[in-house]
Every structure is written in C-alpha cells, then in structure tokens.
Image (cartoon, grey):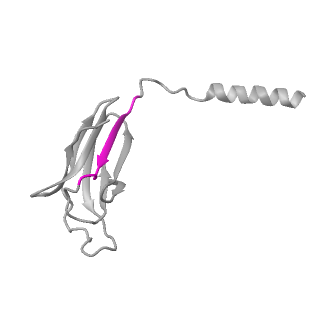
Amino acid sequence: MRWSYFGLVGLMSLSAAAPLASAAEDYAVLIISRERLEVSTNCEIGLYLNDQLAGRLFQEQATSFNLAPGTVSLRLKLLPGQAAGCLPGLLAPPAQNITLKAGDVRKLRIAQGPDGMYLKGAKLDY
C-alpha cells in the first residue's frame, strides 16, 4: 500500500514538471497539391522545405505540413524513378519563399511555366 502511494505521488510530480503547451505557439498549415494535370510528367516530384526533402508527390496527390510561422523556402525537383526520363537535372530550380502567419491555411498547387515547375496559389475548396 505504501509503495503504491509513493508511486502515485511520483507520477503526479512528473506531470507537474512537464512543460505546458502554450496557446501562443500557433502553427500554419501549408497544403501542396498536384491534383491538376498541369505538369506534363509522370515522374515523382520532390518538395523541399528549407532545402530538406519533406515530401514526394505523384500525379493527383496532395500533402500538408504544420509549420511554425515565418518565412519558408520551397523548391520543387524531379526525383529519380523507374519511369523513363525521370532523371533529375544538373541545376537545382530556384526556390520560392513564402511567409506564413500563425493560423494561416494556405494551399499551393504545382504548375508548369517556361522556366520549369513552380508553386501557384490555389483555392481551399472546403
């Protein structure tokens, strides 16, 4: 009986030492979509956030991220795959920077332009 009492007191003291979540630490949601067939390739597209591979998208897919507010660098690049012609180029495409505020929900879609792939704003359609 005595050990269970001390165990209960020990567990209660651990929960008191745990940091509490603050409502001031809000996040932004970033949705990247390849749902439209604007990019004329069946290759997998890699999504880099701050120069780190964060996601892979095939045709008709979307992914989302919970990010801290601030500026985020986004870059798209073809990833090597088993389909013919899916070798990445030698030069890395330019990055796009977006600024997110706490509580934002932003949706971007992958589009094709004369300079290659880029991210374009899209409606949420909820």
Q: Residue at x 24, y 74 (%)?
A: 85
Q: Residue furthest bottom?
A: 84
Q: Is residue 102 left or right of residue 85?
A: right
Magenta-drawn segment: 26-36
Q: Would you identify the image quadrant in which residue 94 lies?
A: bottom left
Q: Position of residue 39 (x, y in %)?
A: 20, 59
- The front one of 48 and 119 is 119
Does the magenta run of residues contain 37? no
Does the magenta run of residues contain 33? yes
Q: Residue at x 28, y 42 (%)?
A: 72
Q: Residue furthest right?
A: 1
Vertical order, 73 against 126 (above or below):
below
Q: Position of residue 2 (x, y in %)?
A: 89, 27
Vertical order, 126 against 57 (above or below):
above
- The front one of 12 and 37 is 37
Q: Please state, as top left, top right, bottom left or bottom right, where the N terminus lies in the image.
A: top right
Q: Residue at x 31, y 69 (%)?
A: 80
Q: Residue at x 19, y 58 (%)?
A: 93
Q: Position of residue 7 (x, y in %)?
A: 80, 31
Q: Is residue 90 left or right of residue 79?
A: left
Vertical order, 15 against 123 (above or below):
above
Q: Would you identify the image quadrant in which residue 68 lies?
A: top left
Vertical order, 115 against 80 (above or below):
above
